[in-house]
Image (tube, grey):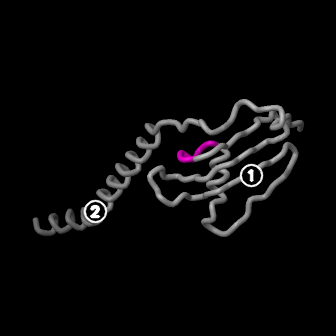
């Protein structure tokens, strides 16, 4: 009888040792699921900064930015990027460069209308491109 008990315990030793790992996997799955649900239930950003109408002198401008403040957090006292004046004419190629954390990605996100706090004007002239292969 003792031999049978020890043999059964020896067989169950590995699965019993995996119980804490299974608990950790369930906790990670719950956290991941809640993050996915939060992302899927988030409201869409309104692209309220992209200009849709252009005046006669701005027809050759692809991108026009004149802002005093661009920030990801509306309640932050320190903006991510401040005092930007940028005009990109149609057909121009530009490069955005700078140190890590200087606001390059925030500037691009502001052009795309993804930054929630912009104090100023971000205006785009949408161009239709035709690609031939």
Q: Nearer the viewer, residue 46 or 54?
A: 54
- Contact, mark 1 vs mark 2 (Cβ under 8 Å): no
78 drawn magenta: no
Q: Nearer the viewer, residue 11 or 2?
A: 11
Mark 1 nearby-residue class (10 Å; few <14, some 14–19, many ≥20): few
Mark 1 vs mark 2, foreground winner is 1
Q: Nearer the viewer, residue 105 or 1?
A: 105
Q: Please give the name of the residue rendered at 65% of the width and 43% of the height, measured from the top-left corner.
A: 121
Whole-percent x, y for residue 98 in the image:
70, 66
Whole-percent x, y for residue 117 in the image:
54, 47
Q: Which residues are magenta?
A: 113-118
In the image as oriented, which residue stretches furthest toward the top? 53
Of mark 1 and mark 2, the one earlier in the sequence is 2
Q: The N terminus appears in which quarter of the rendering?
A: bottom left
Give the vertical position of 130 relative to 88 (above or below).
above
Q: Nearer the viewer, residue 19 or 12?
A: 19
Mark 2 nearby-residue class (10 Å; few <14, some 14–19, many ≥20): few
Whole-percent x, y for residue 42 in the image:
45, 39
19 displayed left or right of 45: left
Residue under numbered circle 1: 86
Whole-percent x, y for residue 92 in the image:
86, 49
> Where, by quadrant of the figure, is residue 105 drawn?
bottom right
Q: Please give the name of the residue rendered at 52% of the width and 52% of the height, measured from the top-left corner.
A: 72
Q: CA distance from mark 1 to mark 2?
A: 56 Å
Residue under numbered circle 2: 20
Q: Please give the name of the residue rendered at 59% of the width and 44% of the height, measured from the top-left corner.
A: 114
> Where, by quadrant of the figure, is residue 8 drawn?
bottom left
Give the vertical position of 2 relative to 49 (above or below).
below
SS of the residue at dot 1? Answer: strand
SS of the residue at dot 2? Answer: helix
116 drawn magenta: yes
């Amino acid at each position: 009888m003792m031999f049978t008990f020890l043999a059964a315990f020896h067989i169950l030793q590995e699965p019993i040792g995996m119980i804490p790992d299974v608990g950790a996997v369930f906790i990670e799955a719950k956290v991941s699921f809640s993050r996915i649900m939060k992302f899927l239930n988030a409201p869409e950003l309104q692209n309220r900064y992209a200009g849709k109408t252009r005046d006669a002198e701005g027809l050759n401008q692809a991108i026009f930015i004149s802002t005093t403040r661009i920030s990801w957090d509306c309640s932050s006292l320190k903006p991510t990027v401040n005092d930007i004046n940028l005009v990109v004419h149609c057909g121009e190629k530009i490069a955005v460069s700078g140190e890590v954390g200087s606001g390059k990605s925030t500037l691009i996100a502001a052009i795309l209308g993804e930054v929630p706090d912009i104090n100023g004007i971000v205006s785009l002239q949408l161009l239709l491109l035709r690609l031939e292969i």
